[in-house]
Image: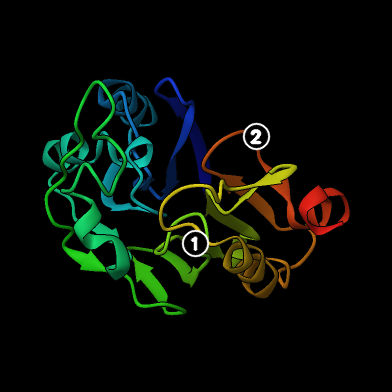
Amino acid sequence: MLIKRIVTGIIEENCYIVSLNGKALIIDPGDEPSKIKDEIEELEVRPIAILLTHTHYDHIGAVEDIRQAYGIPVYVSPLEQDWLGDPQKNFSSTKERLVKVGEAENEFVMEKIYELDGFRFKVVPTPGHSPGSVSFLFEDELVAFTGDALFKGSVGRTDLPGSEPEKLLSGIRKYLFVLPDETRIFPGHRDDSTIGHEKETNPYFN
C-alpha cells in the first residue's frame, strides 16, 4: 500500500492518496483540487472513494471537484453529514470562499471494518476536535490516519464550537494508543509519526 501526502491550502492540510493495485482512496481532499488531480494522474491510479476524517472546511474544500471528476462516493460520520453543506458549521462562513459540499453518499458505522476493492480498514470515533471526528485504522499495514485528533507532538484544537478536550484525549487513549507502537500515524496537518513515539513524548499525555 502506497501513501502519498499532498499538502493543500494556506492552513497546510494533509490530503492523502492511498493506493493499492492501481486503485486509490482519497482521504480529506481539503483544497487545491487541480494539485490533487495532478498527483492522481502522476500515480496512474483510479480513485474509488473519498474518506473524510471530519468536515472542517480545510479538509473538505476539494471534495466536490474530486467527487465529480472521478464519479466516486463520499464517506463521512453521520454526526457531520449536515456540516458538509453548512458554511457556519464547517467554519468557512468567515473565509474568502464558502465551502458547500453535497450530501455524502455513505455514513460511517463506528468500529466497523470496511472492505473496499482490496482496501481493508476500521473506522473508529476520535471526537473532541469536532463531534464526528474519526480515524481510519489499516491494522494489517500498521497505519492509522488520525485527522485532527492526534498530531506529531500535539493534538487537535479544542477551542472551537463543538470541541470537547476530555473526549479528545479519551478517544486517543481508547482507540489509538492501544495500537502497536510501530503503527505509523498520518495526521491532518504536520508530519507523520508513530504511536510509540507519541505515547512516550506527546506533551498532552506526559
Q: Residue at x 28, y 26 (%)?
A: 95
The residue lying toward the viewer, choosing from 120 and 184, is 184
Q: Which residue is mark 2?
A: 191
Label 2: how many residues lie within 10 Å, few (<14), some (14-19) or many (20+)? few
The image's colouring method is rainbow
In the rendered structure, find residue 155 and report the number of the disc placed on it. Answer: none
Q: How many marks?
A: 2
Residue 59 x, y percent position in the rendering: 37, 40
Residue 205 x, y percent position in the rendering: 80, 58
Q: Amino acid at mark 2?
A: Asp
| Quarter assignment of residue 80 | bottom left
Q: Which residue is mark 1?
A: 136
Dot 2: element: loop
Dot 1: element: strand
Q: Residue at x 54, y 53 (%)?
A: 145
* Residue 177 as seen in the image, left or right of residue 171: right
Quarter containing the C terminus: bottom right
Q: Amino acid at mark 1?
A: Phe
Is there a contact, CB below 8 Å, between mark 1 and mark 2?
A: no
Q: Residue at x 12, y 46 (%)?
A: 71
Spatial CA distance of label 1 from label 2 is: 17 Å
Q: Residue at x 30, y 27 (%)?
A: 41
